[in-house]
Amino acid sequence: MNELIAPNLPYDMMPRARAAIADMHLQQFVGRATHLKDEQRKNVFGDDFGHDGYDALRDLAANTKQHALDHLDELLERFIERAQATGSIIHAATDAREACGIALDIAARHGAKTCVKSKSMLTEEIGLVDVFTKAGIETVETDLGEFILQIDNDAPSHIVTPMIHKDRASAARSFVRVLGSRYTEDPTELTMIAREHMRELYRRADLGISGANFLLADEGTAVICTNEGNFDLSVGGPPVHIVFVGIEKLLRGARDLAPFLKLLARSGTGQPLTVYTSFVKGPRRSTDASGPKEVHIILVDAGRTGILASEKRELLRCIRCGACLNACPVYRKVGGHTYGSVYSGPIGAVLTPELNRGSPREEGLANYPDLPRASSLCGACLEACPVKIDIPKFLLHARAELRDRSLSPTSESRALALWRTLAQRPMLFRMAMRAARMHARMLGTHDGGIAWIRKAPGPAAGWTSSRDLGIATEQPFRAWFTEHSAQRGSS
Ligand code: SF4
């Protein structure tokens, strides 16, 4: 189920995090794949642009995108006018329900029974496949990873690599179970099996659906970057095509596109460019060999104008490359499903509570109080981000909001309140430290002036659930510090 469209869900990330950490297969798949992609990203940028060139490219992209966001109203008007001039039918949806409703109307008008869909995070966000399936429209994911997840009744766990939490053997088992094919773990053979299954679907589909990576206002064109060619088949075969796209995807035009194409593929997968960069500019013309007779573009807000009006506006620069997920030490350990939201990893942690803010379906941080804490604040996400979104800053803002709205877990609030009380009273602090040292001397395992406690009581119990607590018993840190700073001062 899509949690973004299900209000008032109880939300607790910790049980999922514990299960993920205990799952050695998950650790292996996610850890290895993210590490590899992160290394590939660094290598390809270093080789192609050098450090300074890469940084200049990021600055250019960040400024270009920010400029587009700052002029979004003008660009939207221009895009709508130019896209309509080339025959596209434009719709505006304020939220997920409206976006799905518009698509259902289009499908009903054309008597659509089968739909082929290429990968789109926005359609995940609005829960489109569930809505279509309930309406009796067979909706098939055509991206290979998404297809495997769909037949497994599973959900994507990464923005770019949806089945990063699975291996080839599980895909092979699913193909045997659902498609009746012979068991093979060979990627080419698996692709051929999926291809054979889908060719027939492309032929009989009434409707094609996709997302878009960019919208070009000057040209009234949607740009879609893919690696498998499935988008081109889903737009080329069916008579009707619907593009779902968030309004933040606007750029001024083709003149601004090049830096983003250079950054998107390199940041996401380490490729110089995605294999396919497709442009949708209206329906098929009389001179075209193929293409849909009708193109609908559904411009989705779903909280984006709220973000645009806030101090978190720069979050909308995100081009969904997934680099911050690959770089994040927390994501690498727990994978995407742990976050419990469609967008996972560092960008998901700050973006998810903002989506749909102000709408009846929104609970913001109250629905996702664990997300801002799913970070070590190491800054790897900012370093990896091709459009320089300062994710750590927004994580800190969100943590401050949790505190101000009393949304922090009680145990954490109590621990911090205790710390505050002690830190503000030196005498009390020293007494507490003395008591801790006595406790450590009696119960800890001694090693070179440190007593290690395996299972601490009270507020420190969480700390020792995954590590030992070391307390200096022979010389308190403050005494050591005073002594050494005095020595340094006299030398
Ligand atoms: S926040 Fe930056 S790194 Fe993360 S997905 Fe978005 S663009 Fe990529």
Image (spheres, rainbow, N blue to C red):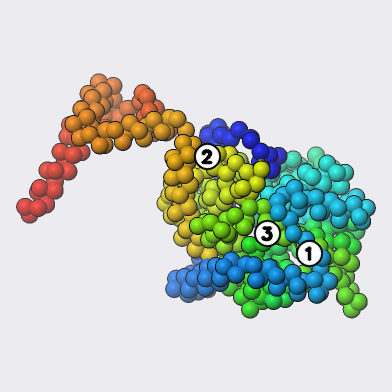
Q: Position of residue 8 (x, y in %)?
A: 63, 35
Q: Amino acid at mark 1?
A: Ile
Disc 3 target residue: 246
Crowding near pointer 3: few (<14 within 10 Å), some, many (20+)?
A: many
Quadrant in which residue 263 is drawn: bottom right
Q: Residue at x 57, y 62 (%)?
A: 317
Mark 2 and mark 3: Cα distance apart in space = 25 Å
| Comes first in the chain, label 2 or label 1 | 1
**468 and 99: which one is in front?**
99
Q: Position of residue 461 (x, y in %)?
A: 39, 27
Q: Is mark 1 within 8 Å of ligand 1?
A: no
**Quadrant occupied by the C terminus:** bottom left
Residue at the spot of label 2: 369
> SS class of the residue under badge 3?
strand
Instruction: Give me the disc on residue 442.
Output: none
Q: Amino acid at mark 2?
A: Pro
| Residue under the image location 73 percent in, 55 percent down | 93
Rendering coords of residue 43 (x, y %): 51, 65
User: Badge 1 is on which residue?
Assistant: 90
Question: Where is 466 relative to 457, above or below?
Answer: below
Q: Residue at x 56, y 71 (%)?
A: 67
Task: Say above or below: 171 vs 39.
Answer: above
Quadrant where the N terminus is found in the figure: top right
Q: Residues within 10 Å of mark 2 (few under 14, many from 20)?
A: many
> Does the image show residue 394?
yes
Mark closest to the chain's N terminus, 1 or 3: 1
Q: Nearer the viewer, residue 455 or 43?
A: 455
